[in-house]
Image (cartoon, rainbow, N blue to C red):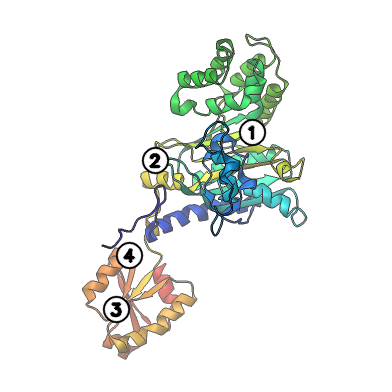
């Protein structure tokens, strides 16, 4: 019995219509990236595990797809070296996996970008502005809006600490979603403010635990976040210091003013956080830039925004669609120490990632794709027989050389079948040429939507193109 064809869970095939729609998204995003001076690079799908591990936190490390070494990866392994002491049949699977898997599929595009910058530092000019549109892989549980293989569209600038770069990212988001006709909200916080949370509640060593918990606020609610923080060792008093921050409301200026009081010793603990105050200064400066730039998209400060990646050190961003229920469709932030891991210190960068697959789902759900994406083909030449086919081939060639997408029906089939083909592919124009057209040296073209029909001299390519426009 033949095996039923299938693909792995969390992955998808993309047909011609879907690819036309996806390319519409990619082309729109690329066009905006380029207007801000960003240029494209690509990196391999697989990276050394040593490049990937430890960059995304413990939870991120668990989601890495690891690639088994070529050949018999398990030959020559002394399993006794990996036994768990005191347990006869238990092995240290983490250590063993590192022995048999030296490579992994990239989890995102930012860490490979940092590796690229360090590896090619003598070939590039700083500040270095690049964008990258490629698939990434995460061994996550597939669900609506969450895939194991998905595309990211990243834009980063590295080699500058100026928050003008953060402003540009906000402007890029603003422009992209204006062009895509999607209503979004841009949320901004600062990782130094999150460090301040940990400091003023008296647990500066728990900043990662606090951040990971806070990052789940939208998904699990305040009570579950507080419970997780307590599980990680925070006291009730420490949690009570953080709770009012997570429920803070008001304007941007009001939120910053309240937080400044808390970070300056005004919380129940009386602790001053210099890191938190620095983060508030940066937020104030960035929102001042945003106001001056006249951003049309809604932008708000969200002090519960954490984004659970350990490498962020400054501003953090998240973008949510307002008219379609889905998770964040963009996210990113500033990182000061990422290239230092690879031996290049003091190289600050900031970037944002557009989640192309979720953006696709939003635009599809809202029916916002342009209707003319249905077919790349502008005109179909019907096949009326061998002689007629030879007659239209030079016309099709001339149109293609002028940039018009042309199809010639390959078989001399019934006209109804050829009409149906054009209809199913949403080809707007059909050219039917028989013996009369051949004798007169003309080409007959019909607009299938309006019914308008015109004839042109066989060599009147300019006239034909004008009619097709």
Specify the label residue 432 is tagged with.
3
Specify the label residue 96 is tagged with.
none
The answer to whether the residues at label 2 and label 4 have Cβ atoms under 8 Å apart is no
The residue pinned by badge 2 equals 143
The answer to whether the residues at label 1 and label 2 have Cβ atoms under 8 Å apart is no
Taking depth in this image into account, of 310 and 395 the one nearest to the observer is: 310
Asked if residue 448 can be seen in this view, the reply is no
Image location of residue 217, percent across then percent down: 49, 25
Q: Closer to the N terminus: mark 2 or mark 4?
A: 2
The residue pinned by badge 1 equals 315
Nearer mark to the viewer, of 3 and 2: 2
Image location of residue 238, percent across then percent down: 59, 13
Q: Closer to the N terminus: mark 4 or mark 1?
A: 1
Q: Measuring 34% from the left and 81% from the top, which residue is drawn there?
A: 443
How far is mark 4 from mark 1, CA to CA? Answer: 46 Å
Taking depth in this image into account, of 45 and 334 the one nearest to the observer is: 45
* Image quadrant where one finds the N terminus: bottom left
The residue pinned by badge 4 equals 425
Q: Closer to the N terminus: mark 3 or mark 2?
A: 2
How far is mark 2 from mark 4, CA to CA? Answer: 31 Å
Q: Regarding mark 1 in the picture, which secondary structure is present there?
A: strand
Image location of residue 54, percent across then percent down: 63, 39
């Amino acid at each position: 019995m033949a095996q039923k064809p299938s693909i792995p869970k969390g992955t998808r095939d993309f047909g011609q219509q879907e690819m036309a729609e996806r390319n519409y998204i990619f082309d729109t995003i690329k066009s905006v990236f380029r207007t801000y001076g960003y240029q494209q690079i690509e990196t391999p799908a697989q990276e050394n595990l040593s490049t990937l591990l430890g960059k995304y936190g413990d939870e991120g490390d668990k989601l890495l797809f690891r690639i088994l070494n070529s050949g018999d990866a398990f030959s020559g392994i002394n399993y006794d070296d990996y036994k768990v002491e005191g347990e006869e049949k238990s092995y240290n699977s983490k250590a063993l996996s590192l022995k048999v898997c030296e490579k992994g599929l990239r989890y995102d595009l930012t860490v490979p970008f940092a590796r690229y910058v360090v590896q090619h530092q003598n070939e590039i000019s700083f500040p270095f502005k690049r964008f990258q549109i490629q698939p990434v892989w995460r061994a996550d549980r597939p669900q609506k809006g969450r895939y194991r293989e998905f595309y990211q569209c990243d834009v980063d600038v590295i080699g500058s600490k100026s928050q003008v770069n953060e402003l540009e990212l906000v402007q890029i988001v603003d422009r992209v979603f204006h062009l895509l006709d999607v209503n979004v909200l841009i949320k901004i916080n600062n990782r130094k403010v999150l460090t301040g949370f940990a400091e003023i509640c008296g647990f500066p060593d728990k900043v990662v635990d606090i951040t990971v918990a806070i990052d789940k606020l939208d998904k699990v609610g305040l009570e579950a976040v507080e419970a997780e923080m307590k599980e990680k060792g925070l006291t009730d008093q420490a949690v009570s210091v953080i709770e009012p921050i997570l429920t803070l409301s008001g304007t941007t200026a009001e939120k910053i003013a309240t937080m400044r009081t808390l970070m300056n010793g005004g919380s129940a603990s009386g602790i001053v956080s210099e890191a938190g105050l620095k983060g508030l200064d940066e937020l104030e400066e960035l929102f001042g830039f945003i106001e001056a730039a006249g951003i049309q998209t809604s932008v708000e400060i969200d002090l519960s925004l954490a984004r659970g990646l350990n490498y962020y050190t400054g501003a953090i961003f998240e973008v949510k669609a307002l008219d379609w229920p889905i998770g964040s469709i963009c996210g990113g932030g500033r990182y000061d120490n990422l290239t230092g891991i690879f031996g290049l210190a003091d190289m600050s960068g900031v970037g944002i990632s557009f989640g192309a697959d979720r953006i696709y789902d939003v635009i599809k759900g809202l029916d916002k794709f342009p209707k003319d994406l249905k077919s790349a083909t502008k005109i179909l030449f019907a096949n009326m027989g061998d002689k007629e086919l030879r007659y239209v081939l030079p016309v099709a060639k001339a149109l293609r050389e002028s940039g018009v997408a042309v199809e010639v029906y390959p078989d001399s089939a019934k006209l109804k079948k050829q009409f149906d083909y054009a209809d199913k592919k949403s080809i707007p124009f059909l050219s039917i040429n028989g013996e009369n057209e051949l004798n007169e040296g003309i080409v007959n073209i019909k607009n299938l939507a309006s019914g308008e029909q015109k004839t042109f001299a066989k060599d009147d390519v300019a006239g034909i193109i004008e009619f097709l426009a």
